[in-house]
Amino acid sequence: MTKKNILILSPDSPYNSMGGLGVHLLEILRRFDNQKYEVTVLAQCSPNCIINNCKVFGVSVYNFELGNGFRETLSETYINQSRFISVFNILLNNGSISKPDIIHCMDWSTGIAAFEITLQTGAKLVFAIHLSISNYLKNVSTTQVLQWEIAKKIEFKLCQQADAILQVSDNYSNLFPFFAFKNKTYIIPNGVDCKDYEKSEPFKHVGKNRYKIVYIGRFADMKNVDVLSGIDIPKNCDLIFIGGAQGGEQSLINRVVERSKVCKNIHYVGTMYGKEKINALCAADLIIMPSIHEPFGLVALEACAAAIGGKTVFASSFVGGMSEFLNSEAAINCGTTKESIEKSLFRFLKMSENEKKKMRSAAISIAKKYSWDNTTQNIQQVYDNLLNNN
């Protein structure tokens, strides 16, 4: 059987990723059928490596530093598309990779490169939507109106030209403009490996208080970090922030750090990955995710799996894709406002151990419904459908 060639374009690295997209990439690479597919990845800021016989080539990028923790991410994104195209052509010409049958474009920000390589090769185009720029912008203010409008047009054009669209949640597929493309849309949720959480090891969080409340993820507006770090924290709780500036804003981290100097209950500890991250989640008394926008909410699924450790309870805003798998039996609804978050903390503190146990049990049941094996198999089925209809 002749292998089919898949080219994946990713704005995030499968190692030490900035968010759920990079985690998603790593997990599906680990599970691809490499007897059937020859998979090549061009990933921004990734080390060159091989994962399950899938070749990963890092694409170095320009950085536009504006000072005070801000970066000109849009200009950076547009200009760096030329790097993806250049790296592809070098690798194709020197025989390091083969002409692709399918281009799997992860996110609108690799769209320009995907268009160009599709024109060169005639490959089928799969557009995976992990964060819709058209819908995310409704929740944030920006002065870069023209550039964001161009970004939205790229996203729309990808939907038009794609042979298949991958969505992580039905919620997202029903938003504008995606509902117009339902005939070629496949809903493929993220997954979680529950076995990883069955093997968690002891972990000691910072702070001297009894209860450890953990936020983990990107420091971005959609994650509602500013509101969370400004709440009145109960005296017997430590609020711990885990994450870095990659994929977010250093300015938000700076504000959390400044608040930690005033409030001894707030702690910023930087990034955690792999086993350390899992241990930290399983050692938390409460994981909190007060996002104002979520396509799926991979951290929410990981928080449900963390309940396997027998300690963790989860509080979520239940927005976006999270509303499709969470319920009030499995998680506390913390909302998105300062008042609602504070109310959810007091509810948590009043819960009996039996109530927490029931909530953990419901959360574990949810986590076990989602697996990376299913995610990968469903993506491969989309590839097969396109290739068989060629």
Image: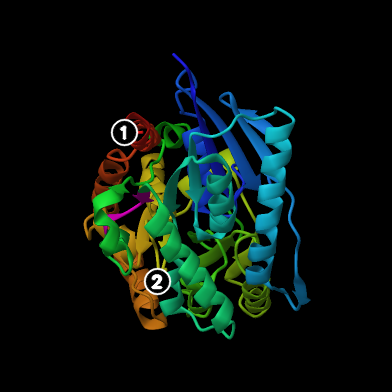
- Give residue 156's position: percent from left, percent from top: 41, 65
Q: Is residue 163 visible?
A: yes
Q: Residue 167, relative to residue 229: is it above or below?
A: above
Of circles 2 and 1, which is in front?
A: 1
Closer to us: 142 or 211: 142
- Give residue 3's position: percent from left, percent from top: 48, 21
Name the kind of residue labelled 1 in the image.
Answer: Asn
Q: Which residues are magenta?
A: 165-170
Q: Is residue 181 left or right of residue 236?
A: left
Q: Quadrant of the C terminus?
A: top left
Disc on res. 389: 1
Name the kind of residue labelled 2 in the image.
Answer: Asn
Q: Is residue 219 left or right of residue 181?
A: right
Q: Residue 173, relative to residue 46: is it above or below?
A: below
Q: Is residue 62 left or right of residue 196?
A: right
Between the residue at mark 2 and the residue at mark 1, the CA separation in whole angstroms equals: 32 Å
Residue at mark 2 = 135
- Give residue 10's position: percent from left, percent from top: 57, 48
Which residue shows up at 58% across the image and 44% down it? 120
Which residue shows up at 69% across the image and 73% down it? 72
